[in-house]
Structures are given as structure tokens and as C-alpha cells.
Amino acid sequence: MSRALIILLAVAAAILPGTAHAWRGGYGWGPVFIAPPIYVGPPVYYGAPVYYPPPPRPAGDACYAGAYVCPLDQPGPVGAPCSCPANNGRVGGRIG
């Protein structure tokens, strides 16, 4: 065998772990031991879920019923049904 092949085999035997080193999960050369990296997962939180109420809907103060627009006594949610007085009864519309 050539001298280069012998040196290559000696270096490979020193670098690669033997069966005694493989079970520990690291590499060691005498008193020197290199441990494998340790994975630490993200923290786990066991708190109560946080509830955020939905934002308030905008309030409308007028009823839009076709050609009629009338003010409301109290503001209501936009898009809710309402009615305005007309010449021959009430006309249905939406709060806007």
C-alpha cells in the first residue's frame, strides 16, 4: 500500500466515530468531547385565550327610503331596516 493511502485511512479512522462513540451522539478524542447540537423548541403558553370584541358598527342617524329621507329618534346600526312617513303611509328603507 502506498504511504498516502495509509495516512488517509489513519485520518479517517481518527475523524469518524467508532461504535463506542456513536451511541453517545457526539465525537470524542481522549479528554476532548464535542457534543451534538441540542434543539430547544419554542416556548409553550398555557394561558386563557384572549377575546377581543368586534369593533362597534357605525351608527346611522337618518333613514333612506327611496325618495324620502327622514331623521331617526335614536341612531341605529347602518343597514338596519327603517321606515319613513310618506304621503300615503310609511315607506320602508335602510339606516344610513
Image: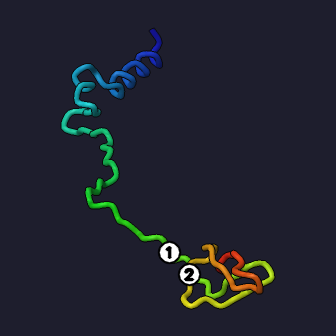
The image quarter in which residue 88 lies: bottom right
| Left-right relation of 33 to 53 | left
Q: Earlier in the sequence, mark 1 or mark 2?
A: 1
Residue of label 2 = 76
Where in the figure is residue 51, as x and y percent of width and height?
A: 37, 66
The C terminus, quarter of image: bottom right
Image location of residue 15, percent across then percent down: 35, 28
Identify the residue at image location x=77%, y=86%: 87
- Residue found at x 31% / y 25%: 17
* Quadrant location, the N terminus: top left
Instruction: Give the amino acid type for the residue marked by disc 2 in the picture.
Output: Gly
- In the rendered image, the residue lying farthest to the right is 67
Relative side of 47 to 57, left or right: left
Q: Which secondary structure lies at badge 1?
A: loop
Foreground label between 1 and 2 = 2
Q: Is residue 52 left or right of residue 64?
A: left
Q: Is residue 38 above or below residue 49?
A: above
Pick the residue in front: 4 or 14.
14
Q: Against 33, is 57 above or below?
A: below
Q: Position of residue 91 (x, y in %)?
A: 72, 78
Q: Nearer the viewer, residue 45 or 22?
A: 45
**Secondary element at image label 2:** strand
**Residue 42 drawn at (x, y percent):** 34, 52
User: Which amino acid type is marked by label 1?
Assistant: Pro
The label number, if any, that marks residue 28 in the structure image:
none
Cα separation, mark 1 vs mark 2, equals 15 Å
Mark 2 burial class by Cα count in 10 Å: few <14, some 14-19, many 20+: some
Q: Which residue is mark 1?
A: 55
> Viewed as shown, does residue 54 lie left or right of 75?
left
Measuring 33% from the left and 48% from the top, which residue is drawn there? 41
